[in-house]
Amino acid sequence: MDYKSHIIFGEIILQKCHIDKSYALWATAPDMDLKTGIHRYTYHNFKAILEIISEFKKQYPEAPIENITGIVIAILSHFYLDAFTAPIFCWNTHYASLDIPPSILKEYINFNIYLIPELPDEALHELYTKSTEIYQEDFPEILSVDEFISFVINELAKMCIFGIIYKFGVYRNLEKLIGRKITRIPVQSQMTMNFYNFLNEFFKKW
């Protein structure tokens, strides 16, 4: 997804988790690998989160750093959202997670990977307005940190052939990072299905 989509989604999730929405800037951090030429590979990986944090702090010293949980939530929101528009290698260098709607996959196969920035203003307005509604409505008003972490890990695991195997190690690594046990209680949400359907119809139209 594009920069603005990541910021919008990050802000909404952080607010639902009662974390300062200024941490939404971290929802753009994995896109640092745009500069490497291997986008969605280097910094779109659970194992790279510490490296993402270290490098992003250097490039964006204005980014808030006091709440490590807020940083993790924002980065995970990026991983989840990106799986709808292209494969992301969030587990390791061999297996990607993806849930790409057919109308987007067609463009992706044709190497038109910069779908959103090229859209007309009317389309962008529809994209941001409708997606914001989905983000707001498909998660509960009050969302716990553990619910969102579990949701993202479980949903990305479903999108990868070996995701179910790798997700347990991801939990352990995130627990070390935030300094506590994560209760594995994924929130019940229709977000994945509804966002998939919306994007499919949207890119058919535009």
Image (spheres, grey):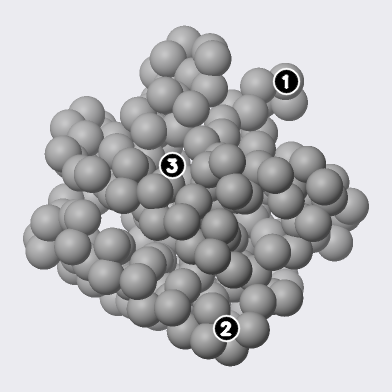
Which residue matches tag 3? 177
Q: Which badge, 2 or 1, is on the more N-terminal residue?
A: 2
Q: Of circles 2 and 1, which is in front?
A: 1
Q: Which one is nearer the viewer's eye here, 89 or 112?
A: 112
**Left of 103 or right of it: where is 36?**
right
Dot 3: what SS? Answer: helix
Q: Which one is nearer the viewer's eye here, 133 or 15?
A: 133
Q: Which badge, 1 or 3, is on the more N-terminal residue?
A: 1
The amino acid pointed to by label 2 is: Glu
Residue 167 x, y percent position in the rendering: 43, 22
The residue depicted at 56 percent of the width and 60 percent of the height is 203
Estimate the spatial distance between the alpha carbons at disc 1 and disc 3, rounded to whole Å: 24 Å
Kindly tell me whether residue 42 is visible in this rendering. no
The residue depicted at 21 percent of the width and 35 percent of the height is 186
Residue extending farthest right: 37
Estimate the spatial distance between the alpha carbons at disc 2 and disc 1, rounded to whole Å: 34 Å
The residue depicted at 39 percent of the width and 48 percent of the height is 197
Relative to 189, say whether 34 is above or below: below
Residue 54 x, y percent position in the rendering: 65, 57
Dot 2: what SS? Answer: loop
Which residue matches tag 1? 94
Q: Quadrant of residue 71?
A: bottom left
Which residue matches tag 2? 62
Residue 78 x, y percent position in the rendering: 51, 55
Relative to 11, say whether 174 is above or below: above
